[in-house]
Image (spheres, rainbow, N blue to C red):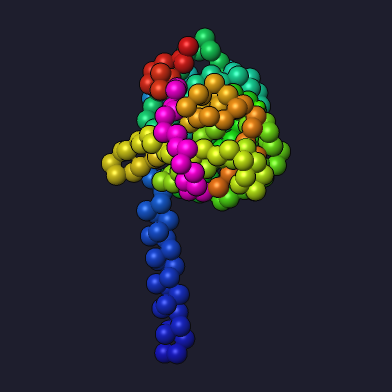
Amino acid sequence: MGSLVHVLPALVAAISCFTAQAIDIPDLRYLKAYTDYDPDGPYHEFLDYSPDLSVQGLDGYIKRVCVTGQWLMYYERYYSVLRSIYNGINQCFNTSSSYPVSSLRYAGSPYGLDDVYYNLYEGEEWTGNEFKGNTNAPTVANLDMNVSSLSISGQSPWTFFTGLQYAGVAVCVYPDYTINDDGIYLHHNRISKIGLTQDLGLPDNSIRSVAKGCLTDNVYRGGCPHQRELGNQDGH
Ligand SMILES: [Ca+2]
């Protein structure tokens, strides 16, 4: 009987662990890429970045996508030249074959759909190299004084600073846009061109550190200029 007493709690723990995982599944990001417009056709499911879609044999062949999360698609390999953004929760979009896609990646947390997160990008319109995370960063390291666009997600604002160690000019950005499907939420905001976003008050290539929360009175709530690319469009 002694051993059974020990086995039972372990079994209960295993079952609750499985239940937690099952509940988490609808929150996971994915992108299903179809080579035809047929919703019943074959597809390749992406859960992570693809810097070169020729690896999956899909360079230039994606005609339809179904997504959960925020996905960025590019004309060129290695995230160069933004083609379109698809975001949603279990939403499908047709894409135009006249504008082939050669790489793709998601913006947001790799852990949970609406977990707090930020992504900083080297180029305008979320192109090029990236610095990302879910905690304070006293330096943005490889993107120091080179951030030209950004994305935030989850239910927390983030403060961006022009100095190292949270010094200098600061702006707080709120995730003021919400996608909701059957009680599953994604809060987010995006800035495509930091230098050209006058309300933001930060020059291009000026961000040097990042902190969670709103640590300044300089608050920015606008953004998401690429709503035009949602839906059955090319983004052009
Ligand atoms: Ca830059």
- Look at the image and say whether residue 140 sits in the magenta stretch: no
Work out whether 29 lies above or below 57.
below
Viewer-proximal residue, 36 or 155?
Answer: 155
Viewer-proximal residue, 214 or 155?
Answer: 214
Work out whether 33 lies above or below 228.
below
Work out whether 115 lies above or below 3.
above
Residue most extreme to the bottom = 2
Q: In this figure, what is the number of numbered marks?
A: 0
- Look at the image and say whether residue 213 sits in the magenta stretch: yes
The x, y position of residue 188, in whole percent, is: 43, 37
The x, y position of residue 45, in whole percent, is: 50, 34
Residue at 35 percent of width and 42 percent of height: 185
Viewer-proximal residue, 72 or 173?
Answer: 173
- Magenta span dominant secondary structure: loop
Residue at 46 percent of width and 41 percent of height: 217
- Is 43 left, or right, of 148 in this rendering? left
Q: Quadrant of residue 68?
A: top left
Residue at 43 percent of width and 84 percent of height: 4
Residue 224 appearing in the image: yes
The x, y position of residue 161, in whole percent, is: 59, 40
Residue most extreme to the left = 182
Q: Quadrant of residue 230?
A: top left
Quadrant location of ligand 1?
top right
Work out whether 21 lies above or below 220.
below
Magenta segment boundaries in residue numbering: 212-226
Residue at 60 percent of width and 19 percent of height: 81
- Look at the image and tell me in which quarter the N terminus lies: bottom left
Residue most extreme to the right = 142
